[in-house]
Structure formats: C-alpha cells, structure tokens
Image (spheres, coloured by chain):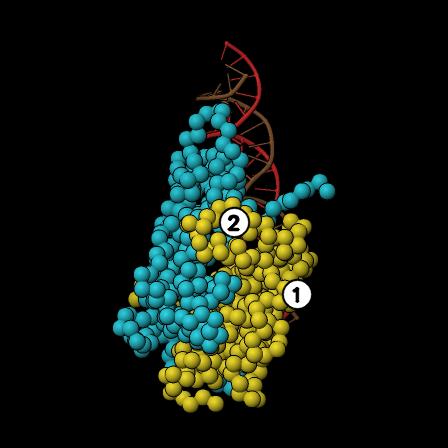
Chain colours: A cyan, B yellow, C red, D brown
Amino acid sequence: MTTEDAPKSRMARDVELLWGLESPPRRRGPKPRLSREVVVRAALDVADAEGIEAVSMQRVSKELGYTTMSLYRHVDSKEDLLVLMIDTAMEGDPPGPRADGDWRAGLEEWCHSVLELYRHRPWVVRLSFSGPPGGPNGLRWMESGLRELVGSGLDVGEAVQMLLLLSSALRESVRLETDMADAARTTGNTPVEVERDYSRSLRRVVTEEEFPTIALMLHEQVLEPRPTAQATEGTGEPTHELDFGIRRVLDGIESYVRTSGTIGGA
Amino acid sequence: MTTEDAPKSRMARDVELLWGLESPPRRRGPKPRLSREVVVRAALDVADAEGIEAVSMQRVSKELGYTTMSLYRHVDSKEDLLVLMIDTAMEGDPPGPRADGDWRAGLEEWCHSVLELYRHRPWVVRLSFSGPPGGPNGLRWMESGLRELVGSGLDVGEAVQMLLLLSSALRESVRLETDMADAARTTGNTPVEVERDYSRSLRRVVTEEEFPTIALMLHEQVLEPRPTAQATEGTGEPTHELDFGIRRVLDGIESYVRTSGTIGGA
DNA sequence: CTGATAAGTGTATTCAATACACAGTTCTAG
DNA sequence: CTAGAACTGTGTATTGAATACACTTATCAG
C-alpha cells in the first residue's frame, strides 16, 4: 500500500544472492571479462593467504589486475562479497549418511569435519553476520548435521536447536584457538607461552576471595595445554578438549531421546 | 636476547588494560578533564542507543564535546576502547551461589541472566574478538558460571569447557535473534514475516532430493515461531526454544557426572 | 547498420582512524 | 619561587577504505 512494497530482509536477500536468483542476465554490451565467481575466488584467496583483514575491494581488484570499481559490476557491495565468500568457503563435502546408522558417531564425525573446515579457513568464524545458512554449501552442511540429529530421534525443531548449539560451540572454539595462535605468531612466542602469559596476568588480579573457582583453575593450570588432554574415554582416538563438550551434548541428546522415548532408538 | 623482549600477547595486555595495571599515573601537566571511564561510558551510551556501528571516535568525542584526538589521551586505540566497552557492558550482577546447591537450577539461572544481559546490549555479541574474559566484570560472570559447573561434580578443566560451550550457544542465539529483530525493524515487517520471508526463499531452492531434512523442516514450519514453543517439561516456567538446548547440555553433564562417579553428587 | 546497454576505467567524495606538532597547564626540582 | 618537564586537549594532515558518478568502448538486437 505504501510506496515501498516488500523491502526483503537480509536473510531472504542473501538466499537469492547466494543462489544467483537475481536479475535475468540480459545480453548486450561487451562480453564480461570478469565474473562473480572469479571475484569471489580471488577474495577467498586473499583471505586464505593473509586473513580477512587483508580483503579490501582494492586488494582483490589488484589481485585480478582490474580496477577497484570493476568489482562493483559483479557484486553490489563488499558486504555481499563477504556473504558469497562465506558460502564458498564451505565448499568441502560434509560427511555423507552413515551406513551403520550410528548417529553419535555420525555427529562426532560431522563436528570434526566442521572443525577441520574452520581450522582450514579461520577467517570464516570471525565473520559474524550471515545469520542462518542460505547458500548451497551452507545448506549442505546443515542438511548433513540435521540428518544425524533427526536420526537420533529428535524432532526437526529440536534438531535445529541442537545444531545451532553445536555449531556455535565449534565456531567459538576455533575462534579462541586461532586467536591464541595469532597471538603466538604475532609475539613470536609459542602458543604455550601465550597461555602462560595470560595465566600470569590473571593471577595478578584474581583473588581467592573474589574468584575462588577461577583461582582454582589457575592453580590447576587448566589453561596450559596438558600433555594428553582429557582421558580418552571409550573410543581410543586422539581426543582434544572440545571433544569433551561435544560428548556431553551427545549424552544429553541420548538421555533425552531415551527418556521421552517417542521413538525406540536403535 | 633480541631487541624486543616480550611483546606480550593481546590477552595478557587486555587483562592489564581492563584492570588499569598500566603505567603509574605520574602527576604533572593539566588536570585531566576527561577520563577513561567517562570515555568508555560515552561510547557505551552510543552503542546502547544506536548500535555498535554508530560508535566511532568522532561520534564519541562529539558526544562528550571534545575533539576526536582527545580520546586518544585516554585510550590507545579504538580497539582498546571496544575491549573496555565489552567488559563494562557486563557490569550487572551474575547470580550468586545458591543456598540449595541445586546446580542445574543454578546453571539455568546463570544462562538466563546471560541471555538477559546480551539481549539488553545486543552489540556485545557481535564484537567477536576479546578471546577469554579478562576484565573484572567478565571474570565475575565466569566465576559465577564456573562455580555451578564445578558444583555439579565436573573438574575445573571440564567445567571450563562446558562454560565455553554454553556461552557460545547463548551468544550465537542472541545474535540470530537480534539479526532477525533488526531485519524486521529495517524492513518494517514483523519478525514473524521476516521468518516467513526467509522460509519462502529457502523453499525456492531446497529440493526434497538434495536437502530432505531441511525440506522436512520447512514443511513443518519449524522456523516460524510456534505459539507455545517446546513442551514445558518438568518445571512449569515459560520455556523458549533455547532452553531445550540448555537442558540437553545439563542432561549431558548430569549423565556424565553420575556415570564417571568421582563424586557422589547430592 | 545503428543505437541502446552493459563492462570496465578514472576521478572524486566521504568517512574513519590516527600520526604529529603545538599551546596551554600544572607540578617538581633546584 | 621559578624554570622546566610532563602532560592535556586542539588543529591539521595523512592514510586507507568504500563507493558514487560520469565516461569510453564493445556488443548485440532490431
């Protein structure tokens, strides 16, 4: 009724952007030498090589041997470019369905794949916007995780909740991890020394009275990476600290589906 | 041995920054009319009123009636200012120890307090850096959560892991939530319409064959906010969707401490 | 063929962060 | 008590980024 009809939310717009559902490509004018794909790929390469801060429109265009403004023929804004980069960054394959139907193993595998992906492209986890996934790759990962969760006996809504929870944890973990690594690289110290430095700083301000539990944590040197991390628990694979959290979440799901027993489970 | 001795990592530096452990304030020169606290508070007010994008050095200084450069007498960089803002934003009180020692209730309470805090200042959750907490307020919240977790029977290291996991989930949840709300505000639609728009976009690209589970999700209209959310489970309090995830995590912890039974639990 | 349309260019604007030199204050040492 | 020294806030300039706008030229539709 008013002048503006349906301004379309970011999320909705992003889906169209990511699937290329925009204006039909009318052909006239010169043959495009650049393309959206090429631009995104170049930006990705810069991010991979030098981190996301290095990605500027000028930098990407230089990389391609074009002017800055030429990029704007292919993406509407830097923001759009970043959105495209994020989905493209997830181009790897999520784990396929398990033959044995072991949802716990399936989810652990999924988590580890996500971790691998994030560790390979740490810049992805610092790009906060991009609410729910909307691109082909993002949706493929979502599908993969969701499948296992639904396989556990959760209903779809519950599965979505747990997927959000799990991915959040994975993201933040990798963020912390790479912050640490960056700090190490920047200062020229080893990661262990960075942790120790941080602990030392904390010890200067953390009193037993005000922060008893944190004091305990510092006392037990929880922050300094332990040799073998957690106990190995069940399976004999190498376990890092994050796995502890993941397993607790899986325990939680397991106990829930068993108790509320809508479905029998395997 | 080299020229640079110990460049000090970000985390360590932040702790000193946040506790004001820097250079001893030698008194000479004019009486400072501004102060770090005042600057941080002004920045906070801008962020509260107009979001974090509105926070620029120029804007904050204008707010105070000073020049941009004057701020740099009190903070070394905008980055430092943001770090200070984050800790100050958490000035509220986390829940104190429970008299009844009910760690589950304690943790739920903690989570809800965190949520309340984040919802009150949504900009905090978009500021990604700032690895582990280092400031007085951040540590107070950490202590509070950690206390309950240790009370459940986890060891400190495990508790730290679970705290990270929980806070990650809370952060991301609020981020999604406020992204949605922002999108609604921006487009002038209601949040419900935004969700529906997003779903509609997804439906255009999600095929049964490639994304069966997501298709199911769309079919069951999981994204559209349901009237009463999840079933109310046990306690009769109002439950939102996030609570489901939180409870699964608590279940996971409970099942773990019961099984590995180092401590008897209540 | 011819003109509308699109691709890439060049230039300019805007906005933010922050370096640097300066002016005016106020405390300390002699 | 006084000469600096040290420090506060100011003014100005630089730099880097995003992006608007006008322009040139290549193509293709009619």
Q: Residue at x 60, y 46 (%)?
A: A8
Instruction: Residue A224: name its quadrant.
Output: bottom left
Residue sitting nearer the eye, A67 or A203: A67
Q: Earlier in the sequence, mark 2 or mark 1?
A: 1
Mark 2 vs mark 1, foreground winner is 2
Q: Residue furthest left?
A: A236
Q: Position of residue C3 (x, y in %)?
A: 57, 16
User: What amino acid is labelled 1 in the image?
Assistant: Arg
Residue linked to disc 2: B202
Q: CA distance from mark 2 to mark 1?
A: 55 Å
- Picture layout, residue B261 above or below residue B66: below
Residue sitting nearer the eye, B54 or B124: B124
Residue sitting nearer the eye, B82 or D19: D19
Which numbered marker is on residue B33?
1
Q: Position of residue A187 (x, y in %)?
A: 37, 63
Q: Chain of mark 1?
A: B
Asked if both marks, 2 and 1, belong to the same chain, the answer given is yes
Q: Position of residue A233 (x, y in %)?
A: 31, 76
Question: Element at badge 1?
Answer: loop
Q: Residue at x 53, y 55 (%)?
A: B219
Structural crowding at the residue carrying mark 2, measured as other residues with C-alpha within 10 Å and reported as few (<14), some (14–19) or many (≥20):
many
Q: Position of residue A253 (x, y in %)?
A: 44, 71
User: What amino acid is labelled 2 in the image?
Assistant: Leu
Q: Chain of mark 2?
A: B
Instruction: Residue B177: name its quadrant.
Output: bottom right
Question: Element at badge 2?
Answer: helix
Q: Is residue A127 left or right of residue A230?
A: right
Which numbered marker is on residue B245?
none
Answer whether residue B261 is visible to the viewer in this image.
Answer: yes
